Amino acid sequence: MKTELQIAADKLIREMFKVQPGETVLLTGDEESDTAVLKAVSDSAKEVGALPMIMTIPTPRGVGKAADPDLPIEPMTAAFSVCDVWIEFNHQWLLYSTPFERAAAVNKKLRYMCLVDFTEELLIRTVGHVETEKLQVFMRKVTEMTKNAKVMRVTTPAGCDVSFEIEPTHYVACDCGDASFPAMHMMTGQINVVPRFGTVNGTIVFDGSVTPPFGTTPDVPIKLTVKDGVIQSVEGGRDAAIYDKWLRDFDDPGMLKMAHIAYGFNPGAKLTGNIVEDERVWGATEWGIGYVSEIDAPPCGQDAKSHSDGICLNSSVWLDGVQIMDEGKVIDPVLVELMP
Ligand SMILES: [Fe+2]
């Protein structure tokens, strides 16, 4: 009898990555990583005839490039540059570190996934309990409907009421757990939309976690008033005042601009304070503020010194005036049929 953890690890390797016999599968972690997760995923890769390897390091002091001083850069780069699959379970993530960027530039076959801080419980809930193929069909349909719309409106019980235009040249990213092709993949259950810059208007209320700077849900929901894509005011309680100061202290107009909105569609995700999980809570939407890459919004992206994300729970969504979701529940008849 396989454990729930092993079944979840099997899903990751077989259903999401579709790992083939003989492929090299590199699993990375640090001292904060869950060793049982690393072992289970390694065992799943071995069982399909692949060649797994676990690489762990002392926990770096920073993430991304801030981890560089603590990394064995050359050997890491060498391994990342030639493996077929790399699944990152690190606490202090290597995404955008120097070994990551060097490997991404040369390893064109690499299938990478960022599963930062994944515990046994998190893997079981957000991978093991998810019907991967059904979710993919459902999420691809939502993606298609969103890309085909001209205007999107989102409201929530906490007071969101915001509208914006869809920009056809911007990339709509659908992270639905298909890591069978070379790319930088993220945890399953998110569709990301970058609105046409300057078209976001209305009220956005964060009643879930806001990261950075908090990493937790604010004391009182934070209300942003947005005009033509730019934050005009930040209201709420003590945390809203801290957030307002945090944004303005960058002394950067880009840090007052709305960046992206994402639908959360992982049936197993719940609000825990881990932003990667929180932004995938079913029926939530997540707004990003600040930096947008030129890949997401060609040709220039949106420049800013940093980036912050906040969660709006139980979202109602309209595409060109037609409501597809009501307070977190899918109501569009076509989508209801496809729901996992
Ligand atoms: Fe974001």
Image (cartoon, rainbow, N blue to C red):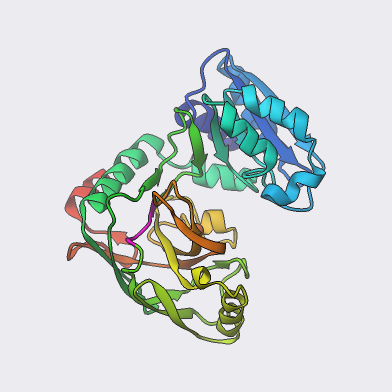
- Where residue 35 appears, as percent x and y from the top left, is 73, 38
Residue for point 69% across, 43% down: 90
Image: 311 above or below 140? below
Going by the image, does 80 lie left or right of 218?
right
- Where residue 218 appears, as percent x and y from the top left, is 57, 76
Q: Count all numbered tags in the image, as a single digit.
A: 0
- Where residue 274 appears, as percent x and y from the top left, is 59, 58
Identify which residue, 11 or 31, lies in the foreground.
31
Q: Is residue 102 visible?
A: yes
Q: Quadrant of the C terminus?
A: top left
Image: 322 above or below 229? above
Identify which residue, 197 or 238, lies in the foreground.
197
Type of secondary structure dominating the magenta stretch = loop
Q: Is residue 204 magenta?
A: no
Q: Quadrant of the N terminus?
A: top right
Residue for point 69% across, 35% down: 28
Image: 24 above or below 123? above
Q: In the rendered image, which quarter is residue 174 located in? A: top left
Residue for point 48% across, 29% down: 182
Identify which residue, 299 or 67, lies in the foreground.
299
Q: Is residue 1 visible?
A: no
Going by the image, does 208 lie left or right of 338?
right
Specify start and end residues of the magenta stretch as a single range: 192-196
Residue for point 25% across, 46% down: 144
